[in-house]
Image (cartoon, helix red, strand yellow):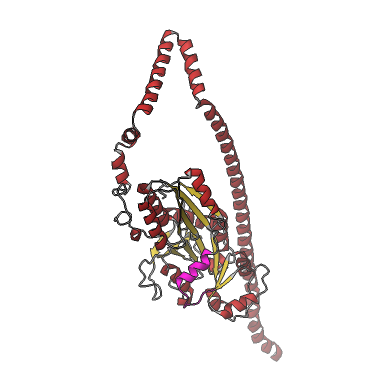
Amino acid sequence: MSQSSGAGPTSPAVQPSQTASASSAPRQDASAQAADYEAEIAAIEDDLLGEIERLRREAAQRERALIAERDAYRAQLQFATDTKAWRASVAYWQARERGLPGALSLGGQLVTYLLRVGYHLGAPYPLRRDLWYRRHTGKSYQRYYRMLGASEAASATPQSSAADPASVRKAVGPDVLYFPAHSWEASDAGQRRLAGQFARAGQRCRWLNPQLATAPAGEVGEAAARLVDADASVRGMARVSIEEVTLPGDGNDITMKPIFRRTALRHALAALMRYCFAQDLREVVCVVQHPGWAPLVEALRRRYGWKVIYDLANELTSQGPLDAPLGAPLQAMLAGCDLIIASAPAQREWLLAQGIAALPPIALVTEQMDAGALGDRVRQLYGRATIIVVTYRNFDKTWLMLKSVLEKTRYPNYEVLLVDNGGEPAFQQYARAMAERFPGVVRCIFNGENLGFAGGNNVGLRAAPDSDYLVLLNDDVIVT
């Protein structure tokens, strides 16, 4: 009796723990199963989206091939039907089919042709030019030319306000897309430092928020931009252009996710491309601080050929000790970029000790370095381009061309080579003034005689033996 009474209280004390452990096991199994199902569904979704994207690319390539083939046949047909012999033969056979009315129509066409020839031979060029502008624009030649901002072009001199070299403001490029590890508010001064230096140089800078928005179901998401409160290193500049851009996606922080989901990547990439087109961001350098951005940055590189720079500013704060090993995503990102920027010598030595096989160039950009030195390092990533412009007694248009090229071109490594075919002394004086104002960007060659368009271009081509790209531009072109 004493044993049974002593055993009674002890058996209920053991049963609750056994019941708890037995009930927790199914819950753990269920949560593990749910996680496996979610991963399996995500993998199936990614595979299906990848297959859809592959089929879409193949269809687009086939469509482009068919369009090219159609255009080639159209060009051949257009070439044949644009000849005077073709038009004359068509008019002749139509006249034969219609009898006397056709013969009268053919005679009328012949009279019209003779009148047109007489007009071109007898009417002076200024009169024909003015009539052409009135017919196509509703304005006279002088009024239309004045509308383009050339009100003083006909009498422009280096001393006039219209053609004053001091009035030209050269565009600074390239534009900068920043792919940071944190939002603008969550980042520190060290992580913002490089963006401040780009902005200080006058380049347009966009800071992408790693926290993606939730894309609306069944709709195309758009990028949302807002001006950020610049810190002391950026405030006080003449032209501050730093915006934080939030892209649509799956609502997650891409720096906290192991992969960039295909659905989020598709939404973010489409929205970013539309944003860049609307903001006229054409020549862009991508500055990356976290490898989570790699799929988006690689897609932009493939599509537009934009340069990629990796900024190690985040590695000092997030990696901890400088001797910590690199992760595989970061190692792949570093090996695939065009330039790596370190802010301290220890940072550069730490990176060199990682043993990456194909390591890009490493630039040491300290806080004391000015924006010009940083611009020089970025400029070295681009091939040298020479824009050759041959001009002869066309001052009223050439200065407009040069002004538009300098104010609209954001490609960082180029020069404009003016080849003057023995023209006006006023233009030569203006060209020298522009070369002094923009050294290394504007260069002049003055021929003693008019060598013609081909001869002038040959002189310019021989004067640019080290250029990677050569552009032949007419002197009456206004670029946008």
Quick one: which residue is furthest to the front in this view?
448
Please say whether residue 316 is visible from this viewpoint: yes
Quick one: which residue is furthest to the bottom in this view?
2
Name the residue located 43 percent from the left edge and 68 percent from the top edge.
201
443 is higher (above) or lower (below) than 342: above
346 is higher (above) or lower (below) than 237: below
On the image, the x and y values in percent for residue 209 come to 47, 65
299 is higher (above) or lower (below) than 342: above
On the image, the x and y values in percent for residue 416 come to 46, 55
326 is higher (above) or lower (below) than 139: below
- Res 339 quadrant in image: bottom right
Q: Is residue 431 magenta?
A: no
Total labels drawn: 0
Q: Quadrant of the N terminus?
A: bottom right
Q: Is residue 372 magenta?
A: yes
Q: The magenta stretch spans which residues? A: 364-379
On the image, the x and y values in percent for residue 398 come to 39, 49
Please say whether residue 19 is visible from this viewpoint: no
On the image, the x and y values in percent for residue 332 come to 63, 66
Name the residue located 57 percent from the left edge and 62 percent from the top edge.
260
Name the residue located 59 percent from the left edge and 50 percent from the top edge.
53
Quick one: which residue is furthest to the top in this view?
100
Judged left or right of residue 236, residue 186 is: right
Taking depth in this image into account, of 118 and 306 the one nearest to the observer is 118
Taking depth in this image into account, of 218 and 212 the one nearest to the observer is 212
